[in-house]
Image (cartoon, grey):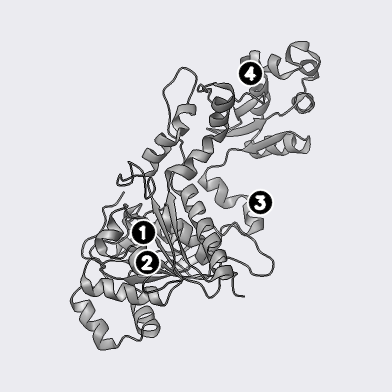
Amino acid sequence: MPGPLDGVRVLDLSTWWAGPLGTMFLADLGAEVIKIEAVQRVDSYRGTFAGQVPSDKPYETSPVFNAVNRNKRGVTLDMASPKGAEVFRRLVRASDVVCENYSARVMENLGVEYAALRRHNPTLVMVSLTGFGRSGPWRDYVAFAATVEALSGIPSVTGYAGGPPLLPGAIMGDPLPGLFCAIGVLAALEHRRRTGQGQYVDMSQLEPTTWTVADALLDFQMNRRTWSRQGNRVAEMAPHGAYRCKGDDEWVAIAVEDDGQWRRLCDVMGRPEMARDPRYADLAGRQARADDVRQAIEAWTRRYVKREAMRLLQEAGVAAGAVLNPRDLLSDPQMQSRGFFPVVDRAEVGPRPYPGCPIKLSATPAGIRSPAPLLGEHNALALGELLGMARTEMEALAREHVIGTAPLSTPPAR
């Protein structure tokens, strides 16, 4: 069945994670996404974890590239050349959306910024996802997830009491902006549907990432309080944290919201006397004696494997979650029952499980319909069928390396 964005064509110039993740969601929802790379400089994500599977094309083996570029068509185009830029303009005339996440000056230097492209397609929706946006004193600065996360304020509240700021263990400065990028495109497309007018979507990686510390920002705004680093402890819940379970490096997270949940936790642990003890009866008391509470909880959790501890607590009405690693996630019965890790067979790596689409629509289902494209795999399809380009013209472009199916240089493995 066609997805809700069936009939929408997206030209995806983005690279690495943030932009490709946003266009991945659009592709999952049914849009025709044409990913454009250049043989002179392929997507740098092709080098991440590449070469772990034997192949004479290691640039096709990156699991992260293959994950965020599923459902897309692959085209190569050297836009730095006049011929490549002209082919791109022809593609723009036949498309609805352009997405790019270059530094702010790149598209202007190539002569394909929004003001230039809208002359070829007045209804075009174009989104630029830069590190800091298209305006302001930092517009030309480059960014990666770590620098964006630092500037967002996340490390200032991440870490242990008395310790230094810590970057989060999982990257947040790329996927969050990517999600907002997809939302921005959807909003602009809805505006175009209503008015017939395209528009420019100016996105930054910094601004969406800053939303993750909204509570700390609001506390300072309202109360002039600056949060200190407290590890896993939070002001509004106690106990709150990760507790050791049976096994090596096995944990369960527990969050107790109110006194009633605390009493239920004590019952599950077989410690009803703690529930009756006035020293632990309220939030303030449990926070003041957090170390004693932790010792009591871990004396119980260490007797169980993490999923069993989670089950016992959840059945008693206490919020708990086993701390799953990637191996656990792939075999998790909840994830399997939801079909979240479908197996996709891709050339050069074979069948592998990939994270699926988290959006489940009853009438217009989203999902993985095709693997990530090989480099330049759909040159003939996009340029020939879409633009009506003759084979001789494509062959001439290939001889000049305007298009191609093999990189002139490969990204370093990471």
Q: SS of the residue at dot 3?
A: helix
Task: Pick whichever of labels 3 and 1 is earlier in the sequence.
Answer: 1
Which residue is disc 3 drawn over?
A: 334
**Residue type for callout 3:** Gln
Q: SS of the residue at dot 1?
A: loop
Task: Pick whichever of labels 4 and 3 is earlier in the sequence.
Answer: 4
**Residue type for callout 1:** Val
Tell me if 363 is positioned left or right of 378 in this view. right
**Residue type for callout 2:** Glu
Give the Cα separation between the discs numbered 4 and 1.
Answer: 45 Å
On screen, residue 64 above or below 375: above
Instruction: Check if mark 2's residue and mark 1's residue have beta carbons within 8 Å.
Output: yes
Disc 1 crowd, CA 10 A, few/some/many (<14, 14-19, 20+): some
Residue at the spot 62% in from the left edge and 23% down from the top edge: 235
Instruction: Judge whether residue 353 can be spotted in this image.
Output: no
Task: Pick whichever of labels 2 and 1 is earlier in the sequence.
Answer: 1
Residue at the spot 52% in from the left edge and 47% down from the top edge: 327
Which residue is disc 2 drawn over?
A: 348
Count the marks: 4
Which residue is disc 4 drawn over?
A: 295
